[in-house]
Amino acid sequence: MAVSRKTAPTTSSRRSSASREFADHWELSDLVTDPVKQFDRYLKDLSAKVSRFESARAELSATMPEQGFLNLLTLSEQIARESGRLGAYAYLWFSEDTKQLQARSFKTKVEEQLTALQNHLLFFDLWWQSVDQRNAERLMANSGDFRYHLETIRRFKPHTLSEPEEKIINIKNITGQSAVHQLYDVVTNGFTFTMRIDGKKKTMNREALTAYLRSPKAAVRETAYREMYRVYESQQDLLGEIYKTLVNDWKAENLQLRHFKTPLESRNLSNDIPDRAVDALLSVCTNNAPIFQRYFKLKARLCKIKTMNRYHIYAPHRAEQKTYRYADAVRMVLDAYYGFSPRLAELAQRVFADRHIDARTKPGKMGGAYCYSVTPNLTPYVMLNFTGEARDIATMAHELGHAVHAMMAEQHNVFTFHSTLPLAETASVFGERILSDALMATETNRSVKQSLLVNQLDDIYATVMRQAYFVAFERTAHDMVAQGATTTDLAQTYMTLLRQQFGKSLRVPQEFQWEWLTIPHLYASPFYCYAYSFGNLLVLALYRMYQEQGSAFVPKYLELLAAGGSKAPQAILAEVGVDMNSPAFWQSGFDAISGMVDQLEQTMN
């Protein structure tokens, strides 16, 4: 059960006995019960609903009654809910152990069958795009919470193909794009890395290796990076060909078939973000690279690094060398959430109470972390790889932010409770800021304060500047692949951008040219990464509002989360006074970052 305000997690005396233990392995039966054995039954029930929906095809007309139209939308939502649960089960099971053959086979089977059913529903979107504007307005006026979903379908009209073509693309993506990306996951999640630690040779997966990238010992950091890129470089031919195949697929579908002008434009339309807003964001990011160049020079002094290079940008501050128990990490995050909003703390604890979190690292488990919000009114699922590092606590706060965002918007339908991609990072990054601020507010030791600032600036670098340069690489790489570039050509371009990003603040060793091979988003979701830059800079601005307005800001923020994806991002942000097209707005985020660097420098004097 979720905690009430009386049992909110601020001190141990306020915690219920149920909250003293926190789940660290998820329970998937809340999605579907025994789906492997009962798959045929689930498929039969879904097929029956799809057939009902498809039988209404003859009744579709621009002048049809509003109630009949609304009934169809309600049925389509039921289909989306049920197929979403089945698809989520398959993905979460696969995430637990990407090497397990049964899980991989089931995931493929589910994707194939759901795609086949989805093809039977395509006619509705195509018909809806053909309805004249007057009747479309009439039908949308009575569609309630479905309105933005309907507007989104019509937004894609210039880039939508015929029904047979759309069906072919859906089928092709399962055996093409999706299969190739799954190959990348299977190959890279199967990598093992070997290091000599305290005189003993250890073999580990990437998650375990990542801990050594932040080791207090410079030699260990360097060795860990060299080992990571040694393994990826040894597979450069395979991973490079996978990347080029996915880029060519993106080009073939989005530029050649759907007639987008640029590869990035397709992502912008999906996000419902104007091209000029994305251009403004990325341009401001590039212009502010010197802020982080200055930070890394300060960090070299602070951490007593004689020659600063790329091995050491995540070097821990000397005060940050402890590890944390899982239960203590959970309490720290819930305490921080409660200090900002008891409602958010209550929602975050639901993830643990409902056993919807898988936290421990283990062989074969998918790397990284994510939150999977499946349907409204179903507590989201969170996957972590918790190793006890301080950074793992921030990751927990981040992913729980995604979860509370979805739960705040659970009054919307399955099509509109998810926010669009750039706003999807708002609550997650805000959760990290809440945690950092809570820890900073109670700290009096100068060294620990420095450590907290270093942690924040490291995270902001990783989620703002680094992500913006990933997109800069993608914009160039997509054009290069179209011109027949080799994997080596792409690596050289990536290296050029790295050196531009860091300037003279540090040296970039040659093996970092292979870093792009290690970034799953570049493979799975082209141009996804600017959402992190967008979300982080947005949060820095929103958090400044919170610092200025205090508790009066909290209801506005909760309303922003409750909007989910029920309106265009521009409209949602306008309600809190944000103009995403303005370079000055994005610059205000960097001004906040610059102020943090100033604050760090002051602690060093």
Image (spheres, rainbow, N blue to C red):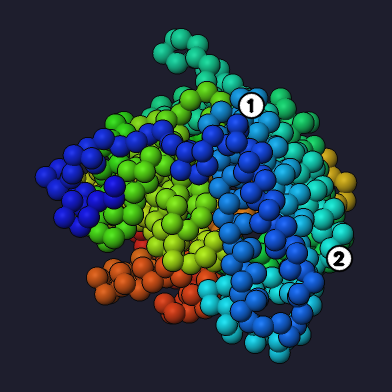
* Residue 492, numbered label: none
Secondary structure, mark 2, is loop
Return the residue at label 1. 102
Return the residue at label 2. 162
Query: How packed is label 2: few (under 14 Cα within 10 Å), some, or many (20 or more)?
Result: few
Q: Which residue is drawn at 82% across and 59% down?
A: 166
Q: Which residue is drawn at 58% across and 78% down?
A: 143
Q: Which residue is drawn at 25% across and 71% down?
A: 550
Residue 350 at x, y percent in the picture: 34, 49
Q: How far apart are the two marked residues, 2 and 1, measured between alpha carbons?
A: 36 Å
Identify the image quadrant of residue 92. top right
Q: Which residue is drawn at 70% across and 37% down?
A: 108
Say whether residue 432 is visible: yes
Say whether residue 570 is visible: no
Q: In this view, does 511 lie above or below 174?
A: above
Secondary structure, mark 1, is helix
Residue 380 at x, y percent in the picture: 45, 49
